[in-house]
Structure formats: structure tokens, C-alpha cells
Image: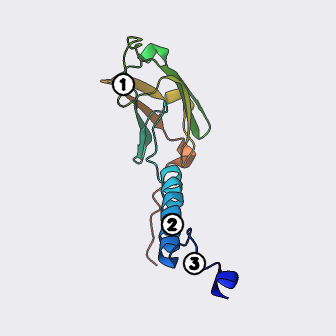
Amino acid sequence: MLERLAGWPTWNWRSPFEELERMRREMDRYFEELTERTLRAPIAGVFPLTNITEDNDNFYVRAELPGVKPDELEISVTGDSLTITGERKISPENENVRYHRREREAGQFSRVITLPGQIDADKVQASASNGILTVILPKAEAAKPKQIAVKAS
């Protein structure tokens, strides 16, 4: 009767613990694949990393652009945005090389940065030194903070 109902004894018998272990391994594999896709460290790609600061009179944008020549950059401003366009070129490797790690990317980039206020486009200055592009964007008069005097009554 046991043989007919449960197929017992059988040669392909498996312990319930073996089945649980198989399911645990499958779940570990699924979570590992999910983690690799979603928690992978972000890559900067060809976009320049930037810092944006301000004081009472100006916004300052500093962008890391190692290896990019200043005359190969296009910088434009409109209203409250700054656009930096260019191309990062990396010298080609010997065709017989084998990469162990490849993080440096080459290619064209265009970065649009929206600033928190209007700028005076006629007074914008840009300079590059040691791979750092610095753009000074004077605030428009309407965007500058106004000091209001409080009168005592």
C-alpha cells in the first residue's frame, strides 16, 4: 500500500531538507542577480563631475575634465542654465592588450546644469587649469539678495 500511494520505496527519493536547500540556493542566485543590476556602483561615464556653489554675487561651476583641451569645449548660457559640451578622447590601446579593468570612457558629452537663479549672461567667465573647468556666472540683479532695513516705531 505504501508503494502504491507514495511511490515508496523509490530510488529517486529526496529528503524535504534537500528540497529546502535547493530552494534556498535558487533564491540566493535570484537575489545576487538583482543586487548586481540595481546596486552596481554608478559610473561617471563621459559626463564631467561638477560642483556648484554660490555666494551673494555669483554662481560657481567647477567641472572635472582631465585630458579635454579648453578650446575643444563649448559653453553656453541661457536664463538659469549652463551647458557644457565637448568630447573626451582617450588614446587607443595596442590591439593585443587584455583589459583587467576598464573604467575610463571616451565619447561626446553634453551636460546641462540648471542653476537656482537667473544669471547675467553677458558677464560669464570660464577658465581651465589642471583639468578643472571653472565657470563664474554672475547673478542677475533680480536674483541677488536684497537687504531690507527694519525701522523701529
Quick one: label 2, few (<14), some, or many (20+) residues within 10 Å?
Answer: few
Tell me the SS state at disc 2.
helix
Mark 3 secondary-structure assignment: loop
| Closer to viewer: mark 1 or mark 3 | 3
Q: Which mark is residue 66?
A: 1
Q: Which residue is at the front of the view, 50 or 21?
A: 21
> Is label 1 in a helix, a strand or a loop?
loop
Q: Residue 89 or 18: which is nearer the viewer? A: 18
Q: Label 1 crowding class (10 Å Cα cut-off): few <14, some 14-19, many 20+? A: some
Tally of marks: 3
Residue at the (48%, 56%) spot, across then down: 32
Query: What is the C-alpha distance between the residues marked 2 and 3?
Result: 22 Å
Q: CA distance from mark 1 to mark 3?
A: 72 Å
Q: Amino acid at mark 2?
A: Arg
Write down the residue under mark 2: 22
Q: Nearer the viewer, residue 34 or 146?
A: 34
Q: Give the x, y percent position of residue 49.
A: 43, 37
Lower position in the chain sequence, tag 2 or tag 1: 2
Which residue shows up at 59% across the image and 41% down it?
A: 80
Residue 12 spot, x, y in % from top left: 56, 68
- Residue found 45% across the figure and 69% down from its top: 150
Q: Which residue is mark 3?
A: 9
The answer to whether 62 is drawn above or below residue 7 in the figure is above
Instruction: Tell me where residue 11 sits by quadrant.
Output: bottom right
- Give the alpha-carbon distance from disc 2 to disc 1, as whole Å: 50 Å
Q: Residue 1 at what x, y percent from top left?
A: 67, 88
Image coordinates of residue 71 in percent, x first then y, are: 45, 13
Of circles 2 and 3, the one toward us is 3
Q: Residues within 10 Å of mark 3 (few under 14, many from 20)?
A: few
* Among the two numbered marks 1 and 3 on one chain, the one whose residue lies closer to the N terminus: 3
